[in-house]
């Protein structure tokens, strides 16, 4: 669609031109930033150190030529008891220049009510038989379960570590991630392909196509076997987006990623993540109708009775999302699409005081979290949203605390059901253009590298893409 693509290029040019100025905003501005939008993730602010006035945002949308749709007013998101308002998008209100005709059809996707979203029996057997689910059909229905797929015992299960990297505005950040992972190999196992034995480690990039100036590095990463995912065009908080707006944000990113600038095959785009982990009911219907295999925007593991040894394995959203049902910061969603996998943004868990020494830090880290954000769900159990931004910038972890937290989170899985470690990074944080932080660039990079090396000391660990984890879950094969 030539018209849409050229509009996109103009918008990206305007966005890129602002960056050098934004980086000069003094550090003191950090304290002034509004809480909204950085509660879980604020990758836009990796580059943009100050709040953007609403007026300026409006002006930018005008300049970018983005069609503004009337957005319904939502009730306060903190109130679980309020039902999500249902609002249908009529064909007349669609920004047709951006949407393919296919999406028009999918707006008719039926929505049905999930009645047992919060009543999940985590002990129920995995919905995946020992014979697996076979080739992809888009019709998987796998309820949340703490049990490994296929009836496997935890000791038969590869201990997956899948690292995502969001936004990716800087070429050197992407190149650093690619170089780091390409320099490491998974344990040799028995040379079994189905469990990725001895393969070079890989990661997944979720690009926001507004950062197209880094496209050459995205292309190189894709060609080197890293997974490419969709993180919208404009990286906006979509809490109030209509389904049409989500579709245009997702499809616009797809359109750019599949141009020759990046060269990703459409069939190789499997995953989507929302900016700031903000979503609403429409997000998942839009992702499903664009044939994504999985979303990775919903946090999991905040439940007080989950300590990292018994996190839920990834599941399809047919039966709802247990953590969504208890998260007061998110809309309590009643209707979910069929067949869309959730590869959750799992919480990380900081070591308790009695284990601090083992992980090389002094006692008191969990008390530190409470001093900083006592109001967060899960913080009393030492949990933090599983994105590096939240560890570095939100809870101000030192490099040893960051490393200890990732190690402890992995070790809890190893002691328990081996649910995969799915952790979100931002490649821009590992460049000298990151938002100022007291931890040096070298120490930030070293914390990530040291975690990967630590993980690879365990023979059962496999560091792979999110899609590779999903492939294994759908058709599980025991380690040999
Ligand atoms: Zn992001």
Image (cartoon, grey):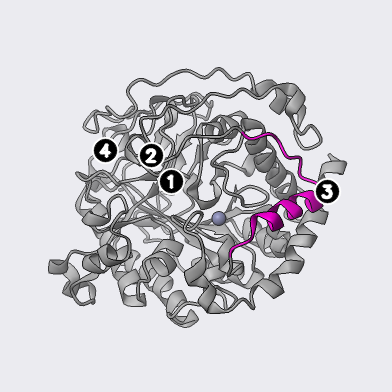
Mark nearer the N terminus (2 vs 4): 4
Mark nearer the N terminus (1 vs 4): 4
Q: CA distance from mark 2 to mark 4?
A: 9 Å
The residue to which callout 3 is attached is 7
Mark nearer the N terminus (3 vs 1): 3
Q: Residue at x 69, y 55 (%)?
A: 55
Q: Give the label on residue 314, or none.
A: 2
Question: As rendered, which of 354 and 26 lies closer to the eye?
Answer: 26
Vertical order, 402 against 105 (above or below): below
Question: As rendered, which of 375 and 162 lies closer to the eye?
Answer: 375
| Label 2–label 4 contact, CB within 8 A | no
Mark nearer the N terminus (3 vs 2): 3
| Label 1–label 4 contact, CB within 8 A | no
Q: Secondary structure at mark 3?
A: helix
Vertical order, 234 against 449 (above or below): above
Residue 183: tell me if it is visible: no
Q: CA distance from mark 2 to mark 1?
A: 10 Å
Q: Residue at x 62, y 43 (%)?
A: 269
Q: CA distance from mark 3 to mark 4?
A: 46 Å
Q: CA distance from mark 3 to mark 2?
A: 37 Å
User: In the rendered view, does 172 fall on the left or right side of 59?
Assistant: left
The residue to which callout 4 is attached is 146
Q: Give the label on residue 469, or none.
A: 1
| Label 2–label 1 contact, CB within 8 A | yes
Q: Which residues are magenta?
A: 51-71
Name the quarter where the N terminus is drawn: top right
Between marks 3 and 2 in the image, the one whose residue lies nearer the viewer: 3
Name, please, the residue furthest toward the left.
354
Q: Quadrant of residue 408?
A: bottom left
Mark nearer the N terminus (3 vs 4): 3
Q: Residue at x 30, y 54 (%)?
A: 375
């Amino acid at each position: 669609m030539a018209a849409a693509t050229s509009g996109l290029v103009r918008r990206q040019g305007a966005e890129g031109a602002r960056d050098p100025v934004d980086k000069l905003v003094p550090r003191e501005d950090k304290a002034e930033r509004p809480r909204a939008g950085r509660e879980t993730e604020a990758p836009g602010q990796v580059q943009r150190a100050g709040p953007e006035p609403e007026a300026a945002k409006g002006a930018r949308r005008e300049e970018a030529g983005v069609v503004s749709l009337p957005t319904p007013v939502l009730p306060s998101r903190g109130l679980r008891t309020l039902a999500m308002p249902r609002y249908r998008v009529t064909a007349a209100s669609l920004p047709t220049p951006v949407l393919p005709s296919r999406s028009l059809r999918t707006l008719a996707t039926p929505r049905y009510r999930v009645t047992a979203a919060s009543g999940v029996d985590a002990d129920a057997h995995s919905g995946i038989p020992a014979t697996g689910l076979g080739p992809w059909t888009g019709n998987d229905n796998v309820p949340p379960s703490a049990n490994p797929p296929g009836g496997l015992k935890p000791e038969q299960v590869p201990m997956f570590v899948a690292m995502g990297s969001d936004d990716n505005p800087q070429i050197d950040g992407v190149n650093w991630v690619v170089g780091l992972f390409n320099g490491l190999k998974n344990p040799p196992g028995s040379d079994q392909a189905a469990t990725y034995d001895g393969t070079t480690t890989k990661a997944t990039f979720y690009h926001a196509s507004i950062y197209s100036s880094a496209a050459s590095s995205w292309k190189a990463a894709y060609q080197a076997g890293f997974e490419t995912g969709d993180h919208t065009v404009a990286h906006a908080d979509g809490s109030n987006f209509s389904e049409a707006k989500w579709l245009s944000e997702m499809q616009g990113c797809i359109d750019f990623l599949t141009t020759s600038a990046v060269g990703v095959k459409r069939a190789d785009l499997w995953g989507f993540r929302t900016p700031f982990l903000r979503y609403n009911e429409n997000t998942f219907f839009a992702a499903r109708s664009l044939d994504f295999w999985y979303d990775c925007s919903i946090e999991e593991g905040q439940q007080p009775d989950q300590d990292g040894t018994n996190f839920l394995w990834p599941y399809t959203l047919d039966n709802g999302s247990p953590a969504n049902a208890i998260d007061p910061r998110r809309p309590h969603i009643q209707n979910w699409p069929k067949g869309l996998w959730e590869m959750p943004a799992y919480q990380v868990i900081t070591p308790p005081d009695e284990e601090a020494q083992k992980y090389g830090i002094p006692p008191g880290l969990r008390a530190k979290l409470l001093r900083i954000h006592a109001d967060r769900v899960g913080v009393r159990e030492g949990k933090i949203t599983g994105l590096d931004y939240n560890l570095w910038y939100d809870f101000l972890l030192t490099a040893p605390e960051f490393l200890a937290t990732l190690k402890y989170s992995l070790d809890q899985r190893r002691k328990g059901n081996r649910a995969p470690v799915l952790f979100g990074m931002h490649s821009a944080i590992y460049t000298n253009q990151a938002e100022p932080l007291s931890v040096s660039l070298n120490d930030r990079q070293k914390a990530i590298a040291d975690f990967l090396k630590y993980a690879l000391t365990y023979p059962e660990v496999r560091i792979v893409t999110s899609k590779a984890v999903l492939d294994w879950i759908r058709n599980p094969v025991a380690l040999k």
